[in-house]
Amino acid sequence: MSVADLKKGEKAVFLGMHGGWGMRRRLEAMGMYPGVVLTKISDHLFGGPVIIRIGRMQLAVGKHMAHRIMVRRIGGME
Amino acid sequence: MKKLLLMGNPNVGKSALFSRLTGVHVVAANYPGSTVEYTSGHLKRDGEYWEVIDVPGTYTLEPTCKAEEVAVKMLDQGDLIVNVLDATNLERNLNLSLQLVKKRIPMIMVLNFWDETAHKGIHINLEQLQQVFNIPILPTTAVSGEGVKHLVDMIPHARTSSFDYSGKDRWNEIGKIISHIQVLEHKHHTFGEILGEASIKPFPGIPLAVVVLFACFLAIWWVGDSIKTWIVDPLFGSLLDPLLTDLSHILGAGSFLHNLLLGGLRNGAIDFEGGFGILTTGLYVPFAIVLPYIITFYIVLSVLEDTGYLPRLGILLDRAMHTVGLHGMGFIPMLLALGCNVPGVMALRTMENEKARFICATLMAIAVPCWGQLAVIIALLSGSGPWGISVYAVSMVLIWLGLGMILKRGVKGESLEIFIEIPPYRFPYPRVLLKKIWMRVVHFLKEALPFVFLGIIIVNLLYLSRVIYILGDIAAPVFTTLFGLPRETVGAVIVGLLRKDVAVGMLLPLGLSFKQLIVASVMLTVYFPCMATFLLLIKELGLKRMLKAVLIMLATFLVTGTGLNALLSLLHW
């Protein structure tokens, strides 16, 4: 499943990213590496960005990119 | 001279630290990527000069955008690295530190935003961290200046770190360090954090944004208008007017010098708005019509920047910006351009690809008026009530949208999506804020005044030599037939190449009808950027792309001018 499939407030483990090497490198540089735990904060309507939190950092991620960020849901909500 | 590089992730306070170290003030803001080109200044320590370089923020030494490339290139020339880290986000920041360590350049680490760690429940053991890296590590709060003196004292103690790690798994290595030196106390969300999340969710984020933006425009309008009515106008009326009246008697109306310095009189009195002398309109337009609104615009903009609200607005507007082929962060250069197109163009460097840069530059040059021009347009249209300004605003928004939609489809390349770290809300430091507003206002005056004076001299020469009438005849088919404008507006178009606010000012004495005022204001906004913006665009886009942009500009000029004139005629306005 991808970040786009998560519900608001759900936690998940980041597994990896489909697609561009450049994008993967950017994510990695910002601290999104496989195994890290993230929380989805919100969705936007009509294809706007998805907001996620990793540690103390909040990221806004475009809708299509969110579909390519693969995660595994873990129990626990905020 | 030895070089000291300030390096770190975006938005960790490098520019604030740079200002503290060198006394050179740079415009910093609370969002990633506000420094796009390196800035350098000097620091004197024990009689020895250091060149201090404010390197654009980067997450990694394997660059992913233009600003990051600049950062990596700088590295080869560094004699000393001051690695600036955000103490409230240590784990992510250490990723760059571990890459810097491998470069074997003497280094000092600075943990900035130290004041925020306490109330966020973050406890960092500095001594242990120092043992890990074996280099000086200091806490600072750069905006208030805390710890900066200590940093200067520690410069001779910088050394190459003895820390070594094998292979690729940097994050694993960082995890080990963090678990030793940092303890997170579980704390309830602070008010700032709650507000931070609320303001990026669609609800209540979007209604809140509408209220904030509306309040901003109202504030700019009200405060600007008050400064003009209560301070600037009385100064012109009671101080300058008597002086210039005396001068007018000495020079004698109609003489060359009188025309150049004071321009024409109205009913025998000095005419600040429409006289077109260097000392009348040349001072009145920049100082009375424009400056009050420029000051208030920059106050509002700077507060939005330093609190961290601006990137949140970008996120909320992300979907809307997609209709013109940009993503939410494309909103920031547009907003800067609304102040002055020059900083707007500078901000293009944060954009990730050529397509986004071209679209943003073209849209900004054509459909985003600078605040100076806007102030004069508002003065010009205010005679016709709220209708005039509304029709102008709607026309500009439609041109922006329509042109953006065409460019999105017509320009080759991929439209990228938003991907940005959202900064926490911060309280702006009044001193830093004031300094920034001051710098921007001074920049406006420096940029504007020479061109305003030159523009006015050219206007006078055009009329004196009667060249204006010849040009008017040549351009008449386009201007009178297609746009329905009198031929005198050609003069405004020529002056607009230099400076847009003066150009719009030239429309004041022409006695245009409502329809003509609207068409002329829109045309003057659309047809060409001012000289300063034009030159910078050539530099940023390259000559070939700029030529394309100019062709698009001329096409937009002809199409919208004709269309708007026809439409307003049909509506009998």
Image (cartoon, rainbow, N blue to C red):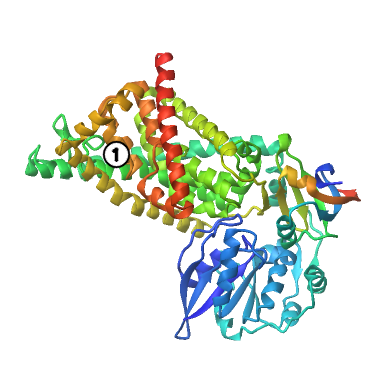
Chain assignment, label 1 = B
For this rendering, which residue is in front, B144 or B88?
B88
Residue B409 in percent (x, y) is at 59, 37
Q: Quadrant of the C terminus of chain B?
A: top left
For this rendering, which residue is in front, B517 or B139?
B517
Q: Is residue B31 visible?
A: yes
* Residue at x 42%, y 57% (from the top left corner): B439
Q: Tell me the residue that label 1 is attached to.
A: B494
Q: Is residue A39 above or below residue B60?
A: above
Question: Which quadrant of the figure has residue B522?
Answer: top left
Q: Is residue B456 left or right of residue B248?
A: right
For this rendering, which residue is in front, B35 or B12?
B35
Question: Which quadrant of the figure has residue A15?
Answer: bottom right
* Residue at x 36%, y 36% (from the top left corner): B376
Count of numbered circles on the image: 1
Q: Is residue A60 left or right of residue B181?
A: left
Residue B174 in percent (x, y) is at 78, 70
Q: Is residue A38 left or right of residue B562?
A: right
Residue placed farthest to the right in the image? A75
The secondary element bearing badge 1 is classed as helix
Residue B323 in percent (x, y) is at 61, 35
